[in-house]
Amino acid sequence: MGGLFITLEGPEGAGKTTIIEKLTEDLASDGVEVLATREPGGIEIAEKIRTIILDKQHTMMDPRTEALLYAAARRQHLTEKILPALQKGKVVLCDRFIDSSLAYQGYARGLGMEEVFAINEFAIQGAMPDVTLYFDIEPETGLKRIAQHAGREVNRLDLEKVDFHHKVREGYHLLLKKFPERITSINAAQPIESVYEQAKETVKKRLAQAGMLK
Ligand SMILES: Nc1ncnc2c1ncn2[C@@H]1O[C@H](COP(=O)(O)OP(=O)(O)OP(=O)(O)O)[C@@H](O)[C@H]1O
Ligand SMILES: Cc1cn([C@H]2C[C@H](O)[C@@H](COP(=O)(O)O)O2)c(=O)[nH]c1=O
């Protein structure tokens, strides 16, 4: 693909957005070309799909519809934004990607990780992340953080029962076992500076291996 495709994953309020902002700044000051983006969203069509999926009024949404909408948003985001950036040799930092669908729809919703992987395989055609940073947090802690975060809108998924969020975390733990080479787990309950140091170290190591650090 050319560049390096890095995804950040975790339950609600784990700190992904905060870490992406810091990493983007830091890597840019090292002369690395970075594209920071998010899922669902990142481009107009996918942002519109995001509005539909996360609308609190849409309590009737069928779990398979939900999974298909995430996969559709991902397909458009990948082809329109992520792949072109990778082809230009950029580092792509993406807030959530396929692992979110596997943990949330596949495991927590109970659709099955294999089934959800299959529809996503159709959407991504093998474009798996090179590196994934997983930010591990107790759901209660993460949900408390987002409740206290001024300006952070509460969405339909945030409103799921705490048991759902525990299942999301269990789903991620299964993914850690399934993809140990790709996914690095970071304890996101630590102070933000420590979380960031670990994230930066992992990313810089991979960039150095790929010969992308000047
Ligand atoms: N390690 C940390 N310790 C304490 N507070 C933190 C830590 N990391 C993030 N926060 C705070 O928690 C809130 C949520 O952080 P952030 O938006 O980065 O999480 P997120 O993983 O992107 O959440 P979501 O995906 O649910 O939107 C913010 O107010 C942020 O400042
Ligand atoms: C990509 C993706 C996301 N989700 C869920 C996870 C969150 O609850 C929301 C996105 O909100 P955020 O504040 O931007 O994290 O959507 C999901 O269930 N499945 C997915 O594939």
Image: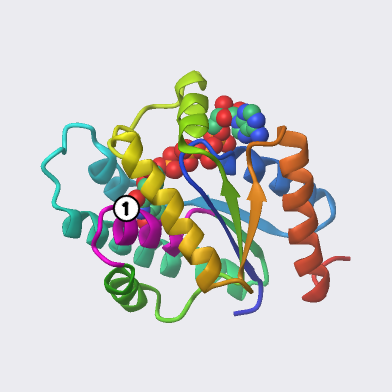
Nearer-the-camera pick, 60 or 11:
11
Q: Is residue 43 visible?
A: no
Magenta-drawn stretch, dominant element (helix, strand or loop) = helix
Q: Is residue 159 left or right of residue 41?
A: left
Q: Report how many numbered discs are placed on residues in the image.
A: 1
Nearer-the-camera pick, 181 or 210:
181
Task: Establish if 102 lies above or below 88.
Answer: above
Q: Residue at x 54, y 69 (%)?
A: 177
Task: Establish if 117 lies above or below 152.
Answer: below
Q: Residue at x 46, y 37 (%)?
A: 139
For label 1, being within 8 Å of ligand 2 is answered: yes
Q: Which residue is mark 1?
A: 108
Q: Is residue 2 visible?
A: yes
Nearer-the-camera pick, 7 or 105:
105
Q: Residue at x 84, y 66 (%)?
A: 213
Q: Quadrant of ligand 1?
A: top right
Quadrant that contains the C terminus: bottom right
Secondary structure under the numbered disc 1 in the rendered image: helix
> What span is in magenta?
95-112
State the image quarter where residue 180 is shown: bottom right
Q: Residue at x 28, y 40 (%)?
A: 54
> Around disc 1, counting alpha carbons within 10 Å, would you say few (fewer than 14), some (14 to 19), or many (20 or more)?
many
- Which residue ends up furthest to the right in the rendered image? 214
Q: Is residue 63 left or right of residue 72?
A: left
Whole-percent x and y of residue 186? 66, 51
Quadrant that contains the N terminus: bottom right
Q: Amino acid at mark 1?
A: Ala
Q: Is residue 99 magenta?
A: yes
Q: How is the image coloured?
A: rainbow
Q: Is residue 46 left or right of residue 96?
A: left
Whole-percent x and y of residue 104? 35, 53
